[in-house]
Image (cartoon, grey):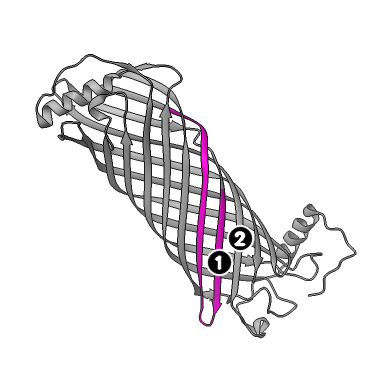
Amino acid sequence: MKTILSVQPNPVIVLIAAGLMIFLGSRPSLSQDNLSVKRKDDVCLRTGYWPTRADASWQTSFSSKSGSCISRLKYHDLDADLLSIEVDILHYAPAFGLNLLFAAAPINNGRSQDTDYENSRRLSESKNPVDGRVDLWSLEGRITLPFGTAPHSLRARAPRLSPAWHWQGILGIQHYQDSLRMFSTRPLPTTSRLDSQESRSAQDNGPIANREQTVGWLNSYYHFSWDAIKIGLKSTWNLTHPLIPLCHSLEIEGKVTPLLTHYLGTGIWNLEDDFAQNPSFHHKAYGYGVSAELSLIYHPWAAIGFELGWQYLWLAADGGTDITYYYSGEKGKSNLDEVRLLRQGVFVKSAIYF
C-alpha cells in the first residue's frame, strides 16, 4: 500500500476516518481472494507497560468453645506498574500461534486491614502498610476458528485488503502471584485473633500453654499464588484501508479467557512466638476467574506496532482449607471461606515483527 508522507496525521482524524469506513458499509470479507500472496510465519516481540490498581482479601472461620470465630484480612491499593515482555509466533499452514508473556512489578503503597470477629462481634482490628511484588506469566496456544477470515502476515500480503475479522480459540496456562509484606510503623500488641487461634488449637489438638501477650513490631508475610487453565476467544478486526494516511494497518482486538484456578496461600505471622515459624498457616482451594483485554493497535509500518488498551484480571476461590502450624508441631484446621483478587488498568505496548 502506498504511504502518503506529505500529510501529517491527527489521531482524532484517523479514528474518525476508521469509524466512517465502518459505517459506510465496509464489511468483513469471508473469502481469501485478497490473501493470495505467499504467506510466511510472523514472530512478534512486544514490550508493555501496565499500571494497575488492585485489591485482595481472604476470610477464614472456625468454631471454638466460645462460639463462631471469623478472621478477615483485606488488602487495598496493591497498585503496581507492571513491565512485560511478550513473544508471539503466528504460523499459517495450518493457522495456529503461540504466545508467551512475562510481567513483574513492585508494590509500594498498599494497605492491610485485619479484623477478627466472635459471634458476629468485632474483637479487634488493625490497619498497616503493605509492600511487596507481583509476578505474572502465561503460555497460550491459539488456533484459527473456521469462521471469519484467515490470518495474514503483515509483511506479505496484497496491498489493498478489505476489512477482515479474524477469530482464534485459546488454550493455555497462567501463573499469578502477589508476595506481600505487612509491617507497622509502631509496636503493636498481639491481637485477639491469636487468642482465638489458641482456642481453636485447644479444640482441635488439646490445650497449649497460656502466656502473656507481648508487644512487638509487625513484620509478617503473605503470598497469594494462582495457577490457572485458560480457555477463551480472541477476535481481531483489521481495518486496513489505503485512505488512512500513514497507516499500514489499524486493528481492534479483544480477548476473553475464563480461568479454572488452583489457589495456594502461605503466611508468616511474627507477633506470636507459636506462629513465627515458616509457614504459620497454609491456604488451599480451587476457584475460578476471568481475564479480559480490549485494545486498539496501530501499525505505521509493517514491522512496527503500537497498542493502547485496557486489561482486567479477576480471581476467586471459595470453600477451601486453612491449616495453622504451631511451634510444637501440632496443626489446627479451619475453613477458608473465600479469597478474592481484582487487578485492572490501562496498558500500552510496542511491537516489532521479524
Q: Position of residue 201 (x, y in %)?
A: 15, 28
* Residue located 87% across and 66% down the image: 5
Q: Which residues are magenta?
A: 83-112
Q: Quadrant of the C terminus?
A: bottom right
Choose between 124 and 106: the one closer to the eye: 106
Q: Earlier in the sequence, mark 1 or mark 2?
A: 2
* Residue located 90% across and 64% down the image: 6
Q: Is residue 99 magenta?
A: yes
Q: Residues within 10 Å of mark 1 (few under 14, many from 20)?
A: some
Disc 2 designates what residue?
Answer: 46
Choose between 222 and 159: the one closer to the eye: 222
The secondary element bearing badge 1 is classed as strand
Q: Residue furthest top?
A: 212
Q: Is residue 86 left or right of residue 228?
A: right
Q: Position of residue 236 (x, y in %)?
A: 59, 65
In the rendered image, the vertical position of residue 18 relative to residue 66, given as above or below: below
Which secondary structure is most common in the magenta stretch? strand
In space, the residues marked 1 and 2 are separated at their CA atoms by 8 Å
Are circles 1 and 2 on residues that touch, CB within 8 Å? yes
The secondary element bearing badge 2 is classed as strand
Please, what is the three-letter code of the amino acid marked with disc 1?
Answer: Asp
Q: Quadrant of the N terminus?
A: bottom right
Disc 1 designates what residue?
Answer: 88
Please, what is the three-letter code of the amino acid marked with disc 2?
Answer: Arg
Q: Position of residue 122 (x, y in %)?
A: 31, 19
- Quick check: can you spot residue 120? no
Q: Residues within 10 Å of mark 2 (few under 14, many from 20)?
A: some
Badge number at residue 171: none
* Residue located 53% across and 37% down the image: 79
